Amino acid sequence: MTPSFEVYHDGDISPAPLEGAEVAVLGYGSQGRAQALNLRDGGVSVTVGLRPGSASRGLAAQDGFAAVEPAAAVAGASFVAVLVPDEVQGEFFERDVVPNLQAGAVVVFAHGGPVHFGDVALPDGADVVLVAPMGPGRLLREYYTEGRGLNAKAAVAQDATGRAWPRALAYARALGCGRAGVIATTFAEEAKLDLFSEQAVLCGGVPALAEAAFETLVEAGYPPALAYIECVREIKYIADLIFEHGVDGMRRRISSTALYGGATRGRRVIGPEAEKALREILEAVEDGSFTAEMKKRWPGREEFLNAVRNDRLEAARDEFEKIIRRAESE
């Protein structure tokens, strides 16, 4: 069987492209912090680039980084990791990165969307690569400190120096991702797969299904805290089984009642209407209409979070946590 993609591990990757290099990590959120710390722990020289009023400056200082303005960080670096939020990358890149890039520098993105969908214009004379850890920054950091690694996807959008691919692999290796495996892909493929999986399953489908099931139980008169446990909290246990053993392996490890009920009722929830919606979601990702919609309608992170918050669900979670803490203290 011919593999559908190539995977690289530490033994396949030379660390040489990062030897003596200065890396500018722009942004200090979940990915920025994890990547900066992992790189530094691996002996790489790191400068964190943050605006003077950034709320992340205090955390960076606690971690031992003296943050500088993004433009200054870029000017002194041969590797530039752009880890600011996707929705601001276009303006940020044009203003702070492009005018200050060293000749022959490599720009590293953690998501292919801004480049693939045209928010970011490729700068002349620079390598442009993708190193996308397949999980949140918290796990990237946690796995690294445990001696493990998180898988990553890597790609090249522009090879100005002839060294873009080994540089991308070396960067992924320095993050610890070569321990688990670095998967070769393209910016377009990563962008579309990532957006679709987020919307259809990970951050869209699963939470929406959990909320709907929770509301169904509460409306039927069941205690909200118990509905929260059954429909939200227990997702972790099944997700862990799927992660470790696959879908079939999960089914082999649950009760006969859960197996029969899940297999015979699951397709009532995810039926033809849901399958049609999934196809429509994929089409909107592929043709760029989702990205265009977000640009037009995005109100800002806090405003959007407040708009989508389910207060009854969060109150049930708070009640559950209080009950557990009280029981543990007795």
Image (cartoon, rainbow, N blue to C red):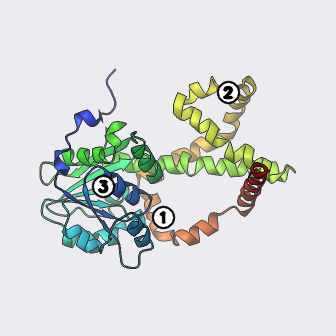
The answer to whether residue 181 is seen in the rendering is no
Callout 3, which amino acid? Arg
Q: Are marks 3 and 2 in contact (CB under 8 Å)?
A: no
Callout 1, which amino acid? Glu
Nearer-N-terminus badge (3/2): 3
Question: Of residues 41 and 168, which is closer to you in this image?
Answer: 41
Label 1, label 2: how many angstroms apart (C-alpha)? Answer: 41 Å
Quadrant in the rendering for residue 308: bottom right
Helix, strand or loop status at disc 1: helix
Question: Of residues 241 and 214, which is closer to you in this image?
Answer: 241
Q: How crowded is mark 3: few (under 14 residues within 10 Å), some or many (20 or more)?
A: some
Question: Of residues 27 and 161, which is closer to you in this image?
Answer: 27
- Residue 254: assigned label: 2
Helix, strand or loop status at disc 2: loop
Mark 3 vs mark 2: in front: 3
Tell me: residue 218, above or below residue 15: below
Question: Of residues 222 and 39, which is closer to you in this image?
Answer: 39
* Residue identified by numbered label 1: 293
Position in image of residue 293 (x %, y %): 48, 64
* Residue identified by numbered label 3: 40
